């Protein structure tokens, strides 16, 4: 069989994580690698792995040495641009995607969470991923962009395809997936193109209208750039937030004493959300490409080679976080890298944090004794970069 091309090697999971047990809980493996081979080349995946906090930070804060121009399976967007193009796009988008715009969404997010939960509260059971954690971020992004909520099932399908990762599939299956992604990008492009046309005719109070109006010294976003950004929001904002919510509830179910503690101290919820991003981060790895030959911890990385930064491991680095394997709901300081680091630091962090807070608050207010349904076999999400489970059914006392 033909070897999978280098460009896509980062779709293959590390061999150390090749069992379901390790995929459901990779952190012991991370801790071992962190100690034993902090920077190593993996022949199987043809890439470098970097595990320690200090080294991950070094990679992510040096875009001159480590480029983001990788993985072209999706459309080009700011995520895969380097300076100066990255800064130009991010500054323009920042005019529209402001913390104030996000804060305005708080009451909407609360309403959405209440509506989604209402039918389940008396039953004492919830399919967490299906009933709440998946629809909530999709509806929020749809509202933010100003697209009708009647399109949200299509949104969900599209965003699922965008983030779908190939595994040890045949070349054929891989090729099919890439074609499916291309098709989805084209459909989304046409879809957003129509909305942009409509908003150019008559602006609304929504993000797309603000993106059209964004202006820095006469520079505007092109139609293509706006489309790419909208698609990026679906790809970067939906599954990640779904997993933040699910991972947070998983921690509450695994450590029930936290439920009472947070109920008695709701002021701790914001730091508990941060600690979730450290302890069970939705994104565990971030890819870059070396722009020149670089020596790191005595290893020679060559220009053009892929470098994977394991933020999931860095977040457990004892050198940075005391008692790193303990979930401390009011941990401070907490400079986790769950949202990345440096110029590509997650643009959606204020929104993800807000959604996490609203959901945890709401669940703890309405539900007592949250627990995983007995006998459930958890299934990990099939992706080398994402940490989460496919479904997390819970029981609770209303
Ligand atoms: C970038 C994680 C939610 C939009 C990133 C990066 C990470 C990340 C690790 C850095 C990628 C890199 O350095 O290559 C997360 C997590 C989330 C989340 C864990 C949820 C808990 C969101 C949401 C949105 C969003 C809700 C938008 C609605 C973006 C964008 C970028 C980004 C646009 C690219 C920023 C740039 O390239 O400058 N995210 N994200 N994210 N995220 Fe998020």
Image (cartoon, rainbow, N blue to C red):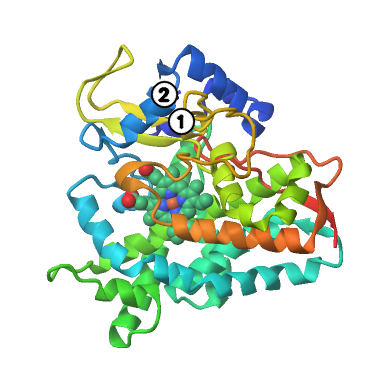
- Tag shown at residue 211: none
The quarter holding residue 135 reads: bottom right
The quarter holding residue 57 reads: top left
Please say if the residues under marks 2 and 1 sit with CB atoms less than 8 Å apart: yes
Residue 267 percent location from the top left of the image: 62, 56
In the image, is residue 293 above or below residue 153? above
Q: Which residue is mark 2?
A: 49
Q: Is residue 198 left or right of residue 339?
A: left
Residue 262 percent location from the top left of the image: 70, 52
- Check disc 1: other Cα within 10 Å, few if <14, some if 14-19, many if 20+: many
Q: Can residue 289 be seen in this snapshot?
A: yes
- Residue that lies at the very extreme toward the left in this rendered image: 217
Image point (46%, 35%), residue name: 285
- Tag shown at residue 310: 1
Image point (59%, 39%), residue name: 280
Q: Is residue 375 left or right of residue 266?
A: right
Q: Can residue 5 be seen in this snapshot?
A: no
Whether label 1 lies within 8 Å of ligand 1 gets the answer no
Q: Is residue 233 left or right of residue 128?
A: left
Looking at the rendered structure, the secondary structure element under dot 1 is loop
Q: Image quadrant for the C terminus?
A: bottom right
- Residue that lies at the very extreme toward the bottom in this rendered image: 202
Image point (31%, 11%), residue name: 298
- Check disc 2: other Cα within 10 Å, few if <14, some if 14-19, many if 20+: many
Q: Image quadrant for the N terminus?
A: top left
Image point (41%, 24%), residue name: 50
């Amino acid at each position: 069989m033909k070897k999978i091309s280098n460009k896509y090697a980062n779709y293959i999971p590390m061999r150390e994580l090749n069992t379901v047990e390790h995929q459901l809980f990779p952190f012991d493996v991370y801790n071992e690698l962190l100690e034993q081979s902090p920077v190593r080349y993996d022949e199987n995946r043809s890439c470098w792995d970097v595990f320690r906090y200090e080294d991950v930070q070094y990679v992510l804060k040096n875009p001159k040495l480590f480029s983001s121009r990788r993985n072209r399976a999706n459309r080009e967007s700011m995520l895969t641009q380097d300076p100066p193009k990255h800064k130009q796009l991010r500054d323009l988008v920042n005019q529209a995607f402001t913390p104030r715009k996000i804060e305005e969404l708080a009451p909407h997010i609360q309403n959405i969470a209440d509506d989604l939960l209402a039918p389940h509260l008396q039953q004492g059971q919830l399919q967490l991923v299906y009933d709440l954690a998946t629809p909530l971020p999709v509806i929020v992004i749809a509202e933010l962009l100003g697209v009708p909520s009647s399109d949200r099932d299509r949104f969900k399908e599209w965003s699922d395809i965008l983030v779908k990762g190939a595994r040890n599939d045949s070349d054929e299956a891989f090729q099919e997936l890439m074609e499916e992604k291309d098709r989805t990008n084209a459909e989304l492009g046409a879809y957003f193109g129509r909305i942009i046309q409509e908003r150019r005719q008559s602006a609304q109070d929504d993000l797309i209208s603000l993106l059209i109006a964004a202006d820095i010294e006469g520079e505007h976003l092109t139609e293509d750039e706006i489309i790419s950004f909208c698609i990026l929001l679906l790809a970067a904002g939906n599954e990640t937030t779904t997993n933040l919510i699910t991972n947070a509830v998983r921690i509450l179910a695994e450590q029930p004493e936290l439920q009472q503690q947070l109920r008695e101290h709701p002021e701790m919820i914001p730091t508990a959300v941060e600690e979730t991003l450290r302890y069970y981060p939705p994104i565990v790895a971030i890819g870059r490409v070396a722009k020149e030959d670089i020596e790191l911890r005595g290893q020679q990385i060559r220009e053009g080679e892929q470098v994977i930064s394991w933020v999931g491991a860095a977040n457990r680095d004892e050198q940075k976080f005391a008692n790193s394997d303990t979930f401390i709901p009011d941990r401070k300081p907490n400079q986790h890298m769950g949202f990345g680091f440096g110029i590509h630091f997650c643009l959606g962090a204020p929104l993800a944090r807000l959604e996490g807070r609203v959901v945890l608050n709401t669940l703890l207010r309405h539900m007592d004794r949250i627990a995983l349904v007995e006998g459930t076999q958890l299934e990990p999400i099939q992706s080398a970069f994402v940490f989460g489970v496919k479904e997390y059914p819970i029981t609770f006392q209303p």
